[in-house]
Amino acid sequence: MSTATTPRPAPSELQSVWLVAEREIGSKLRSKVFVISTAILVVAALASVLWGGFAARDAGGSGIPVAVTNQTQPALSGVEGVDATVADSDATARALVEDGTVDAALVSGSSNPAFDYTVVVKDRVPAALLQLLSETPEVETIEPGAGAADALRYFIALGFGIVFLIAASTFGGTIAQSVVEEKQTRVVEILISAIPVRALLAGKVLGNTVLAMAQIVLLAAVAVIGLAVTDQVGVLGALGAPIAWFAIFFLFGFILLASLFAAAAAMVSRQEDIGATTTPITMLIMAPYFLVIFFNDNPVVLTIMSYVPFSAPVGMPLRLYLGDAHWWEPVLSLLILIASCVGAIAVAARIYQNSLLRMGARVKLAEALRG
């Protein structure tokens, strides 16, 4: 007497998405290259924060010579590591900077409503002083031709840019390689016989987004620990909100980029051809990194960056740290990013579905969109 076996019900679309996401996460966590590279990145980030903190502490411990007036002297109240000289007027304080008696002077007045004083320097901004002041006030350079960029702002801009570049390019490239590998080995034909194509795409994006966000949270935790260990309470307080906004912007920005990476990879059938379709996306990821390096002190460029979806995860947090953004600007920028993300997912899903089973020569973009 034979007994009939009841076939297992097919997984729902949400279950299919999670199954693919689990597969992506598991394969990445089992990769020694991924684990080792993540550990190196975390150690490098922690070392950078600790080195910067101890260097600032050493610089501050020698007593930074600063001229103040009776009106600006309260700005240094409770600030250690500063050797203050009280001048009888703003003009006298400026003269002390010009003749090299002090490194900087705090004079009355500022175009930044958050401050009632301006830091006047001769030709070099003392980054350690700005760290001790907790925030970045307006800086006036007496000899701008010989001046250097604000080191503190530069390194914070560099930090946002390089974290976005590394995380987005690493996991975006992983998605592209996974898609092409499944096409090249014909595994994709087995996968889509069991689950919908859109579930396969969503699972890949979800799995890599979880990994990328975990890495971002880990780096943020490392930065907080490093700043706390080196007693950089002021910098930590100033960076708290920008780091939180960076994580939020990165979440939606990465979903947008991951969808495009998957769609671009679906248009080719060999690993050697991935660069032909993903290079434009890689350029979009690299652009914010180079823009903040060269234009971190340019408010016009930073404002434009903060509203362009591909650069908003870097531009807007930096403007928030500098105090250049109104409260409503990150909200508006995030809404623009979310709307762009929805549009990119729709286009990417169409390209992915129309190109996934096409083998051989590279699929042209127009053909992929037409299906």
Image: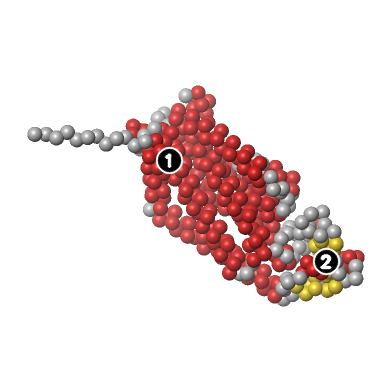
Which residue is pictured at 85% across the width and 62% down the height? 108
Residue under pointer 1: 203
Can residue 59 be seen by looking at this rendering?
yes
Q: Amino acid at mark 1?
A: Gly
Q: Secondary structure at mark 1?
A: helix
Which amino acid type corresponds to the residue marked 2 in the rendered image? Answer: Thr
Residue 246 placement (x, y as % from top left): 60, 50
How crowded is the residue under tag 1: few (<14 C-alpha within 10 Å), some, or many (20+)?
Answer: many
Q: Which residue does the image show at 54% across and 58% down from the upper left?
A: 219
- Between 68 and 115, the one nearer to me in the picture: 115
Ranked by sequence position, the earlier of labels 1 and 2 is 2
Q: Residue at x 58, y 62 (%)?
A: 224
Q: Residues within 10 Å of mark 2 (few under 14, many from 20)?
A: many
In the picture, the quarter occupied by the N terminus is top left
x 51%, y 60%: residue: 42
Residue with the mark numbered 2: 72
Q: CA distance from mark 1 to mark 2?
A: 57 Å
Front position among marks 1 and 2 = 2
Q: Is residue 309 visible?
A: no
Image location (x, y in percent) of residue 135: 71, 60
Residue closest to the far bottom: 62
Callout 2 secondary element: loop
Above-or-below relation of 262 to 35? above
Relative to 175, residue 42 above or below: below
Q: Is residue 57 above or below residue 216?
A: below
Per the rendering, the mark at residue 57 is none
Q: Residue 45: name its quadrant.
A: bottom right
